């Protein structure tokens, strides 16, 4: 099953092309142009949600690389024990904002963003993840159009927290789908070739078979399978023993796939977010117009 399944039987979820478009529209272009920041809707924060291995960290690195931005990591585990107390926290945020404005463009990053707004924190968690709960929304509000600074959060289980705090902090929600068939096919091919592998179609190596078998797995799982298979020794043995798809399947099977229940949880969460509701409303415009026309025709008959 793919995350492109319909929400409530209506519209498909965002695909890979949608992700690239949204990142360009809300992160890359505004951060690259002061004119756009001043004249277009100012997006100050974005939450990237998706399963483990779906590419959240890679996407963050791509944004920072494209913008040549400095990254400030305020993840709870990264700041635990530093700047203690309320005054220390205020000093930390003051320094981050001041320095980020001086060396902009800059990205302020929060990993496991849902932990900041958890209703109840586990006793075993000593990182104090709710420390920034009240200050993060204030930080976002303090960003002006001339500030080339953005807050980006990443979450694997965004539905396990108070949604009000999450939506107040993150203006845009981005859901990373599991890769579709064509994406998996290209990914397998590019990864194997980049590792020095030789794909001999006449020798029985069928990339499409790997793409079919890997349905439901994340990009990270495919990367793990290729890295585990393509050792230095195996690369040297290719002339005597050509690569076969079966070699990758054993390592892929050790990875956890994205089960139907988890995919549905992402779909339900996204459909209830402001971003998901707006998207569904826009895509469902034709249905609403059809309903209005039917109501109007019934009134005329009466």
Image (cartoon, rainbow, N blue to C red):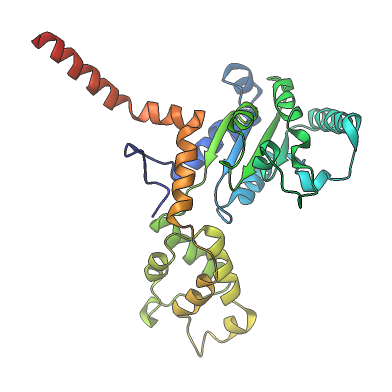
- For image coordinates 50% across by 75% down, the residue present is 248
User: Position of 296 compared to 54: left or right?
Assistant: left
Q: Position of residue 302 (x, y in %)?
A: 10, 9
User: Position of 43 compared to 214: left or right?
Assistant: right
Give 76 or 241, whichever is nearer the viewer: 76
- For image coordinates 82% across by 31% down, the residue present is 93
- For image coordinates 90% across by 34% down, the residue present is 85
Give 7 or 57, whichever is nearer the viewer: 7
Is residue 269 visible in the rendered image? The answer is: yes
Give 232 or 49, whichever is nearer the viewer: 49
Q: Position of residue 133 (x, y in %)?
A: 73, 32
Snapshot quadrant of residue 97: top right
The relative height of residue 27 versus residue 145 in the rendered view (above or below) is below
Q: Position of residue 35 (x, y in %)?
A: 62, 20
Number of marks drawn: 0
- For image coordinates 44% across by 29% down, the residue present is 277
Snapshot quadrant of residue 236: bottom right
């Amino acid at each position: 099953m793919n995350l492109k399944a319909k929400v409530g039987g209506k519209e498909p979820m965002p695909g890979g092309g949608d992700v690239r478009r949204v990142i360009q529209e809300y992160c890359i272009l505004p951060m690259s142009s002061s004119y756009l920041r001043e004249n277009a809707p100012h997006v100050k924060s974005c939450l990237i949600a998706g399963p483990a291995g779906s590419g959240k960290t890679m996407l963050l690195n791509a944004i920072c690389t494209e913008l040549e931005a400095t990254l400030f990591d305020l993840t709870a585990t990264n700041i635990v024990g530093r700047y203690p107390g309320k005054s220390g926290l205020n000093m930390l945020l003051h320094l981050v904002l001041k320095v980020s404005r001086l060396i902009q463009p800059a990205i302020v990053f929060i990993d496991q963003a849902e932990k900041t707004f958890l209703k109840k924190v586990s006793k075993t968690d000593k990182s104090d993840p709710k420390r920034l709960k009240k200050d993060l929304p204030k930080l976002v509000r303090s960003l002006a159009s001339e500030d080339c600074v953005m807050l980006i959060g990443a979450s694997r289980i965004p539905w396990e927290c108070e949604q009000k705090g999450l939506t107040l902090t993150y203006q845009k929600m981005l859901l990373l789908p599991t890769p579709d068939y064509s994406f998996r096919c290209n990914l397998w091919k590019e990864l194997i070739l980049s590792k020095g592998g030789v794909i001999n179609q006449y020798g029985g190596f069928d990339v499409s078979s790997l793409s079919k078998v890997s349905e439901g797995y994340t990009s990270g799982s495919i990367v793990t399978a290729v890295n585990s298979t393509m050792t230095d020794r195996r690369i040297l043995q290719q002339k005597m023993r050509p690569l076969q798809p079966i070699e990758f399947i054993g390592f892929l099977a050790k990875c956890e796939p994205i089960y139907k229940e988890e995919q549905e949880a992402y779909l339900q969460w996204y459909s209830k977010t402001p971003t998901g509701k707006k998207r569904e409303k826009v895509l469902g415009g034709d249905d609403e117009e059809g309903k209005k026309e039917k109501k109007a025709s019934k009134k005329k008959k009466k």
